[in-house]
Image (tube, grey):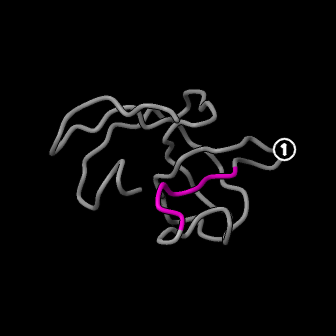
Amino acid sequence: MVPTLRDGDVVLAFPGAAVRPGEVALVRWPARPDQLSVKRAALAADDGWFAVGDAPTASTDSRTLGPAEALGPVRWRLWPHPGRLHAR
C-alpha cells in the first residue's frame, strides 16, 4: 500500500462498517482465508470487491487472487504518523 501505508504502520479498521469505492479496507480472499490484508477497495462486484494495492507492480491483490471480501474500512493510521486515510 506504499505510499499510503508502509510495513509496520498501525491502523484502525471498522469491521462491519460499509466500505465505499476508493477507500482503504481490511480484506480477505477466499483463496487465503486465514490471511487479512489492507488494500484499496476499487470496485464492488456481485461476488466481492476488486481490491488493489496502491503500488500495482508490487502488490498481490485481486488481479491475482480474484474478488475479496471487504471486512470494513480502514480510516485511520495510528502510528507512526497519525492521521485520517482518504479515499481516492
Residue 22 vertical position relative to residue 80 in the rendered view, above or below: above
Q: Count the marks.
A: 1
Which residue is located at x 62 percent, y 52 percent? 51
Q: Mark 1 points at which residue?
A: 46
Neighbours of disc 1 within 10 Å: few (<14), some (14-19), many (20+): few
Front residue of 4/76: it is 4
Which residue is located at x 15 percent, y 45 percent? 80
25 on left or right of 32: left
Determine if the magenta segment contains residue 54.
yes
Percent of width and height locating residue 74: 43, 37
The image quarter containing residue 84 is top left
Q: What stretch is highlighted in magenta?
A: 50-56
Percent of width and height locating residue 43: 71, 43
Residue 5 vertical position relative to residue 74 in the rendered view, above or below: below
Q: What element carries label 1?
A: loop
67 on left or right of 55: right
